[in-house]
Image (cartoon, helix red, strand yellow):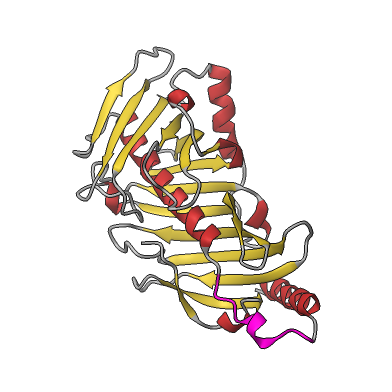
């Protein structure tokens, strides 16, 4: 807590120095700009959903009705192949009301207790943004020993934006490439919401709760931040986000995370001038909102407010 207070105090002082004494009141009443957080959360939720289904398929568990598994012939690993997902009203993608199809390709090795997957979202609109999240090149996944819990990670270099092709699907990695991917999971997960905001890496923890065919009762925790897409503020700044211990279960609440912390930072384009920050706490009420713990700069008037997340 002392370190958090020091950081918040520093942000406040930086904000005051940036805006000066002649700042108009209306310049401190900017509505919270949540675009980077919305994109980060929706992308992580969609990827977490795919991670859980992929592990279920590759480990031979019963699959939901909207999922088809086409086993591959790669004998070097325990399992490989393609997974076809249909997303519709009966089988929604968490925190997304669009319909379409998802293709997952990957390889799995029971000896290592994990695998590497690729995801092709294709025409399915994940972010509701100008540019499309087309897919993810590689996502290493590991199952914690003797548990229902999975850990996955993706980073900026894995993200495919705009037009792409099905060549992003990887089902034939060499053993060296496979091991290198799994080594990415050996890094410590982010724990400081302020330090994480520009790291461009996201860890997803999945608890399948021993109900492999019921994907919607899984519990997820996200640790990470940065930018999925470049997000610009109305003031000409660049927006970043971070999420720490951001936990959700779609079956429990389809509107917001139920605990954790998020941070949004607005940095003036071309330099390091801080235009405003928002520190959010998620809460257990399923109301589509979060609590502003602290805000500075252009978002100063949001201090202590509840704000709508628009995640649903």
Whether residue 196 is visible to the viewer of this picture, yes or no, is no
- Residue at the image point whose x is 35% and y is 13% from the top: 73
Where, by quadrant of the figure, is residue 192 drawn? bottom right
**The one of 25 and 48 positioned closer to us in this rendering:** 25
Left or right of 292 on screen, residue 99: left
Identify whether 238 is placed above or below 7. Answer: above
Q: Is residue 97 magenta?
A: no
Reply above or below: 235 against 230.
Answer: below
Q: Whole-percent x and y of residue 294?
A: 60, 77
Percent position of residue 14, x then y: 77, 74
Query: Which image quarter is the N terminus in?
Result: bottom right
Q: Is residue 23 magenta?
A: yes
**Where, quadrant-wise, is the C terminus in this rendering?**
bottom left
Residue depicted at 80% across the width and 86% down the height: 21
Q: Position of residue 259 (x, y in %)?
A: 45, 66
Residue 173: image location, x then y, percent: 50, 19
Q: Please, is residue 121 above or below residue 78 in the view? A: below
Magenta stretch mostly in which secondary structure?
Answer: loop
> Looking at the image, which is closer to me, 283 or 309?
309
Which of the 4 quarters of the picture holds residue 70? top left
Side of 146 relative to 140 (left or right): left
Magenta residues span: 22-32
Q: How many marks?
A: 0
């Amino acid at each position: 807590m002392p370190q958090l207070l020091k950081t918040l105090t520093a942000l406040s002082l930086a904000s005051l120095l940036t805006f000066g004494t002649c700042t108009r009141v209306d310049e401190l009443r900017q509505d919270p700009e949540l675009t980077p957080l919305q994109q980060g959360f929706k992308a992580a939720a969609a990827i977490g959903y795919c991670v859980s289904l992929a592990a279920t398929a590759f480990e031979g568990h019963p699959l939901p009705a909207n999922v088809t598994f086409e086993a591959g012939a790669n004998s070097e690993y325990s399992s490989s192949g393609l997974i076809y997902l249909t997303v519709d009203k009966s089988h929604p993608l968490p925190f997304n009301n669009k319909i379409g199809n998802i293709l997952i390709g990957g390889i799995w090795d029971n000896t290592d207790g994990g695998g590497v997957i690729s995801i092709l979202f294709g025409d399915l609109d994940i972010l509701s943004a100008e540019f499309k999240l087309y897919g993810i090149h590689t996502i290493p996944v590991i199952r914690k020993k003797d548990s229902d819990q999975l850990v996955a990670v993706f980073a900026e270099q894995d993200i495919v934006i705009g037009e792409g092709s099905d060549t992003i699907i990887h089902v034939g990695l060499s053993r060296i490439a496979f091991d290198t991917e799994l080594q990415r999971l050996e890094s410590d997960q982010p724990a400081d919401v302020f330090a994480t905001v520009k790291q461009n890496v996201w860890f997803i923890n999945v608890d399948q709760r021993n109900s492999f065919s019921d994907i919607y009762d899984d519990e997820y925790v996200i640790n990470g931040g940065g930018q999925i897409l470049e997000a610009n503020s109305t003031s000409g700044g660049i927006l970043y986000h971070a999420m720490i211990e951001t936990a959700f279960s779609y079956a429990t609440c389809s509107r917001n995370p139920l605990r954790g912390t998020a941070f949004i930072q607005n940095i003036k384009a071309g330099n390091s001038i801080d235009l405003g920050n928002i520190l959010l706490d998620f809460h257990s009420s399923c109301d589509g909102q979060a609590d502003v713990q602290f805000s500075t700069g252009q978002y100063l008037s949001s201090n202590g407010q509840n704000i709508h997340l628009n995640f649903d």
